[in-house]
Amino acid sequence: MPTRTARTAWNGTLNEGGGQVELSSSKAATFDVSFPKRAADEAGGTTSPEELIAAAHSACYAMQFSALIAEAGGTPVALDVSADVTLAPDPAGGFQITGIALTVRGEVEGLDEATFLKVAQDAKATCPVSKALTGTTITLDAALEK
């Protein structure tokens, strides 16, 4: 299996500096990063490690869920997955990720609601990004839409 790479170039101090995160493996994009924007409610056109984790988690979960739906005998028509990653002060100092809330709305053929919800939970437990983030509380809000 491949290894994927991202690179960050940072200049200056934490509060006055800034940088760029480059998706090196895919060369898909380069994003600005800034600590003041990271800690603010409005991102103002910059990304953050938490947003990048949210992107990775939502994409990974969608892939895993679609695979498990098929294994359960269903057909995933459409999955809408979001991940909200919360950054908060750490009582020990600095900051910490305090939780991740996954939300999925799915249009799936061939599965009843109970099976859909079970498979949704299984996908949360077996998604590689979920596994990598086991030190963080991950919640799931899943709903089958017809």
Image (cartoon, rainbow, N blue to C red):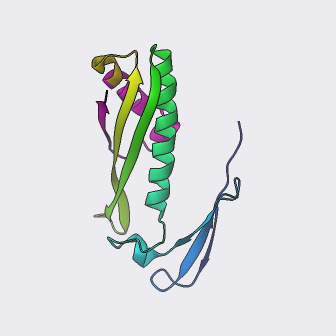
Number of callouts: 0
Query: In which quarter of the view is residue 8 placed?
Result: bottom right
Looking at the rendering, the stretch of residues picked out in magenta corresponds to: 117-145
Q: Residue at x 63, y 62 (%)?
A: 29
Q: Residue at x 41, y 42 (%)?
A: 81
Residue 143 lies in the magenta stretch: yes
Residue 144 lies in the magenta stretch: yes
Q: Is residue 135 visible?
A: no
Q: Nearer the viewer, residue 117 or 109?
A: 109
Query: In which quarter of the view is residue 2 placed?
Result: top right
* 84, above or below 95, in the image: above
Q: Residue at x 31, y 63 (%)?
A: 88
Q: Position of residue 41 (x, y in %)?
A: 32, 70
Q: Position of residue 45 (x, y in %)?
A: 47, 72
Q: Nearer the viewer, residue 113 or 40?
A: 113
* 40, above or below 97, in the image: below
* 60, above or below 11, in the image: above
Q: Position of residue 146 (x, y in %)?
A: 31, 27
Assign the N terminus to one quadrant of the image.
Answer: top right
Relative side of 44 to 18, left or right: left
Q: Position of residue 80 (x, y in %)?
A: 40, 40
Q: Residue at x 37, y 69 (%)?
A: 94
Residue with the most extreme front position: 146
Q: Is residue 110 visible?
A: yes
Query: In which quarter of the view is residue 44 placed?
Result: bottom left
